[in-house]
Amino acid sequence: MLARHIHGYFSAYAVREGVDMDVFPEKFSDREEVDRMLTYIEKEIRRLKTEGREEGREEGREAGQFEMGIAVALAMLENGEPEEKILLYTGFTPEQLAEIREGRLRRG
């Protein structure tokens, strides 16, 4: 049944794309070939999900570091530390520090 569904999807795609169905490979209706394709698709989906999770974690770490930098800069500003020292310790640019000072560079 699954092989018929896959063949049906390929058939609809072929019609939409103007592919001649007389030369459409018969292997797409072969159960073993369909199983191989589905196994490949499932592996790719798992791989992409894993990559997405890893990218999300990295983005979260970067956001957390940025948040920490803002908190450190604010604390240093409140304690009267020189701007050069704040820039050195936080890695912010003078423009970013000005935005933090003015409250325009927000957390999150």
Image (cartoon, helix red, strand yellow):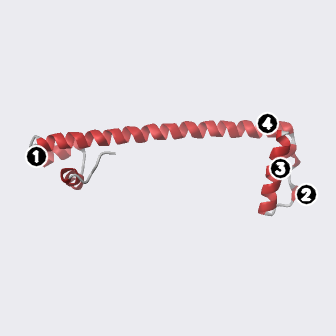
Q: Which residue is mark 4?
A: 35
**Which quadrant of the rendered structure holds the C terminus?**
top left
Quadrant assignment, res 72: top left
96 relative position to 43: left or right: left
Left or right of 94 in this view: 45: right
The residue sitting at 44% across, 37% down in the picture is: 57
Amino acid on which disc 3 is placed: Gly
* Label of residue 82 in the image: 1
Give the Cα distance between marks 2 and 3: 14 Å
Q: What x and y, as percent, mark residue 88? A: 19, 44
**Closer to the eye: label 2 or 3:** 3
Q: Which residue is drawn at the image coordinates 78% and 61% (left, top)?
A: 16
The numbered dot on residue 28 is none
Residue type highlighted by circle 2: Asp
Q: Name the residue that disc number 3 marks.
A: 8
Measured Cα–Cα span from mark 1 to mark 2: 77 Å
From mark 4 to mark 2, how far is it between C-alphas?
23 Å
- The residue where tag 2 is placed is 22
Looking at the rendered image, the quarter that the N terminus falls into is top right
| Lower position in the chain sequence, tag 1 or tag 4 | 4
Q: Amino acid at mark 1?
A: Pro
Badge 1: how crowded within 10 Å, few (<14), some, or many (20+)? few
Residue 56 in the figure: left or right of residue 14: left
**Nearest to the observer: residue 63 or residue 107:** 107
Q: Secondary structure at mark 1?
A: loop
In which image quadrant can residue 32 be found?
Answer: top right
Q: Secondary structure at mark 3?
A: helix
- Residue 86 is situated, as x and y percent measured from the top left of the image, at 17, 44
Q: Are marks 2 and 3 in contact (CB under 8 Å)?
A: no
- Residue beneath the point at 86% across and 61% down: 20
